[in-house]
Every structure is written in structure tokens, then in C-alpha cells.
Image: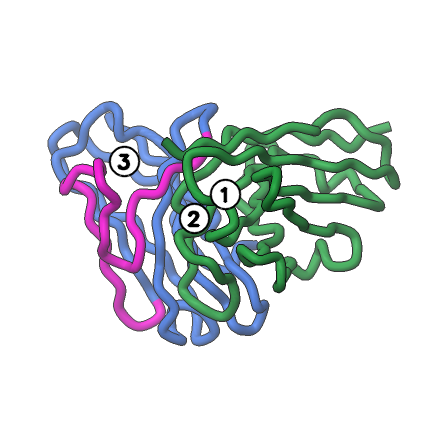
């Protein structure tokens, strides 16, 4: 059971918009700690996608955007492309556990 | 270009020990905190441990405390994870990850670069 809760899977057709939610609690996201997002293509290492809730590292397309409100955060992907098919993870810090925590991951399928 | 190359994984019996290494290049290693994150087969990511750039502070997930020790040799640009009393549930790919800051602690820390990982299998 992950500290941060994500839907196991989402799907969308090419060109559509999908969102992935990440729900935490008062000891992590709700405490004001930032949320970060990672993309993991099959058989590869995770890659940073969004940091500090809304920021994209250099090279990440603006089709990817993040938001945070209260005890939750979301990742939105617009203009879905086949190459977006991957696992997506949210991550934050938890003051009760005194460490970084991840969501369980969401598998995005492009139909 | 930042590169992180893990090594040291393999098959180990329950109760055994293993030392993982992560060779870093492409950045001033001593200036940045580093971390280990693992992923069990078919499962999600799990944070394991972190260490500040100067090695002054170390941090562990509860299930690893007392069994795992993180360390670094800044003269060799290398991060280590010493793992003792290994259990079947420690079977995972272990990733080395760099933080964009010198410190790790109570804060909004994230991992900006990751290695390709090394597989640890604990089985008799």
C-alpha cells in the first residue's frame, strides 16, 4: 500500500487529454511538500517529468503539466502520443515517515 | 552529461550481504545529495536511503534502518549501499539517483537523474 494513491491505469486515444491523480494526506502533500512526477518507459529507468508541482525540466514537452491543490496533485498530458505509453509515478516527502514517498504508479495506455 | 552507473547486484541467499556501487560522472559529485530507490519486479518505486553531499547526514526508509548503510567516497565519485540481513522482499532493481541539492532532509526533494539500475535477487 503506497503512501500516495494513484489510479492503477488510465487510457486515452491519440490527441486526447488525460489526467493522473495523486492523493496524499496531511503529512505529505497536505503539509505543503511539493509533488514531483516521473515517467518510466518499459524496461528503463525513471525519468523526471515535473518537479516542484508545476515545473518541467529542460527537454520535457509542454504537453505535460502538473498541478497541486490541498492533499492532491495531478499530472495532465495533452495531445496524447503513442510514445507517451508508460508508467507514471508521483513523489513527495512525508514528515511522519521522515522520507521520500512514491505513488503506486499509473500505467498509461494510448488506445 | 550526468551519468550514473550502478554495479554490484546479483544473487544472494537470505540473510546474506551485498554492496552496491554507483559511479557518477558529468557533475561535481560532492556538491549533491544522492539516494537509492528500488523497484521490486512488476511493482512500483520505493525510496530506500539518501545521503547529503558531504556525507554528514544519512536517511533511511523504516524497513531498511539497521540493515542498510549508505555511504559515499567523494574522492572516487562513488555512492555505495551496504545491505545486510537480506530478505526475499529485498529482491528488486536498485537505482542510484542524484538530487539537485546538497542536502536531503525534511523538504521537497526530488531526483533529477537516475542510473539504469542493478538487480538484486535474494533467494536460496
Q: Colour of chain A?
A: blue
Residue appearing at x 39%, y 45% in the figure: B112
Query: Disc 3 designates what residue?
Result: A11
x then y, percent, for residue B31: 47, 52
x then y, percent, for residue B9: 69, 28
Q: Distance between the residues labelled 2 and 3?
A: 26 Å
Quadrant of the image for the N terminus of chain B?
A: top left
Q: In which quarter of the image is residue B79?
A: top right
Q: How far apart are marks 1 and 3 (CA)?
A: 29 Å
- Residue closer to the observer: A25 or B13: B13
* Image disc number at residue B8: none
Q: Mark 2 lies on which chain?
A: B
Other-residue count near label 3 (Cα within 10 Å), few / some / many at <14 / 14–19 / ≥20: some
Coloured how?
by chain
Instruction: Give left or right: position of B115 versus B12.
Output: left
x then y, percent, for residue A7: 38, 48
Query: Disc 1 designates what residue?
Result: B97
Q: Quadrant of residue A21?
A: bottom left
Specify start and end residues of the magenta stretch as a single range.
A45-71
Amino acid at each position: 500500500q503506497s503512501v500516495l494513491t494513484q489510479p492503477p491505469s488510465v487510457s486515452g486515444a491519440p490527441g486526447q487529454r488525460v489526467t493522473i491523480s495523486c492523493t496524499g494526506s496531511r503529512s505529505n502533500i497536505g503539509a505543503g511538500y511539493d509533488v514531483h512526477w516521473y515517467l518510466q518507459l518499459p524496461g528503463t529507468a525513471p525519468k523526471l517529468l515535473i518537479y516542484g508541482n508545476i515545473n518541467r525540466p529542460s527537454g520535457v514537452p509542454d504537453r505535460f503539466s502538473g498541478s497541486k491543490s490541498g492533499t492532491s496533485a495531478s499530472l495532465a498530458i495533452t495531445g496524447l502520443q503513442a510514445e507517451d505509453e508508460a508508467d507514471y509515478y508521483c513523489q513527495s516527502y512525508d514528515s511522519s515517515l521522515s522520507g521520500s514517498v512514491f505513488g503506486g504508479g499509473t500505467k498509461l495506455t494510448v488506445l | 552529461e550526468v551519468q550514473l552507473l550502478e554495479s554490484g547486484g546479483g544473487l544472494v541467499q537470505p540473510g546474506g550481504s551485498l554492496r552496491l556501487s554507483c559511479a557518477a560522472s558529468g557533475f561535481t559529485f560532492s556538491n549533491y545529495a544522492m539516494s537509492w530507490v528500488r523497484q521490486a519486479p512488476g511493482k512500483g518505486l520505493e525510496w530506500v536511503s539518501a545521503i547529503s553531499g558531504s556525507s554528514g547526514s544519512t536517511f533511511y526508509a523504516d524497513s531498511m534502518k539497521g540493515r542498510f548503510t549508505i555511504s559515499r567516497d567523494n574522492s572516487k565519485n562513488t555512492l555505495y549501499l551496504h545491505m545486510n540481513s537480506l530478505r526475499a522482499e529485498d529482491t528488486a532493481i536498485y537505482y542510484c539517483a542524484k538530487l539537485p541539492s546538497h542536502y536531503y532532509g525534511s523538504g521537497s526533494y526530488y531526483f533529477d537523474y537516475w542510473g539504469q539500475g542493478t538487480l538484486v535477487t535474494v533467494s536460496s
